[in-house]
Amino acid sequence: MENDCVFCKIISGEIKAKTVFSDELITVFEDIHPVAPVHLLIVPNKHISSINQIQDEDSPVLARLFYVARDLAKQHGIDEKGFRVMVNTGKDGKQTVFHLHMHLIGGRELAGRLMN
Ligand code: AMP
Ligand code: ZN
């Protein structure tokens, strides 16, 4: 738990969010400004600021980000048609919340190139 971290506050229940899944490692909630019909944030319960701060010991939770993305894509019926996962990092990567998170975006055909 990091002071003044909005995602830590969502994970602890201090701030409300539309949570769709949680377990001992991961919390998933709807993005407050969705860019597609499905826009979920898959978030480690442990406060890790960004990819720059991940450590070898974080391997289990980092793997779970992908397993949870797989399961939620299937649950939302977008696994076959496809979807995108994104982890924005740092200033140039336009990261705005400095608690590691994976965007899971789908439910419509996305632009045919990476956002710039
Ligand atoms: P990023 O730019 O990758 O750091 O993405 C941060 C994301 O968090 C943005 O898409 C925001 O819309 C989303 N976000 C910020 N605050 C909240 C919140 N309180 N509940 C849900 N999503 C949020
Ligand atoms: Zn945090």
Image (cartoon, rainbow, N blue to C red):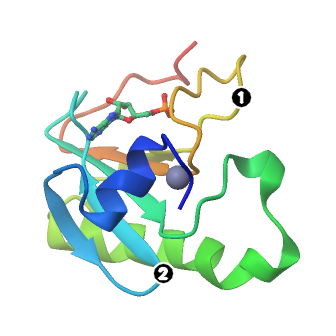
**Residue type, label 1:** Gly
What residue would you read off at disc 1? Answer: 90
Disc 1, SS? loop
Quadrant showing the C terminus: top right
Name the residue rendered at 27%, 69% in the picture. Answer: 72
Tell me the quadrant of ligand 1: top left
**Residue sticking out furthest to the front:** 3
77 and 35: which is toward the camera: 35
Q: CA distance from mark 1 to mark 2?
A: 23 Å
What residue would you read off at disc 2? Answer: 25
Name the residue rendered at 48%, 81% in the picture. Answer: 25
Name the residue rendered at 53%, 47% in the picture. Answer: 3
Tell me: residue 77, above or below residue 6.
Answer: below
Earlier sequence position, callout 1 versus callout 2: 2
Q: Determine whether, in the image, residue 37 is placed left or right of residue 88.
A: left
Name the residue rendered at 68%, 35% in the picture. Answer: 89
Tell me: residue 1, above or below residue 26.
Answer: above
**Residue type, label 2:** Leu
116 and 26: which is toward the camera: 26
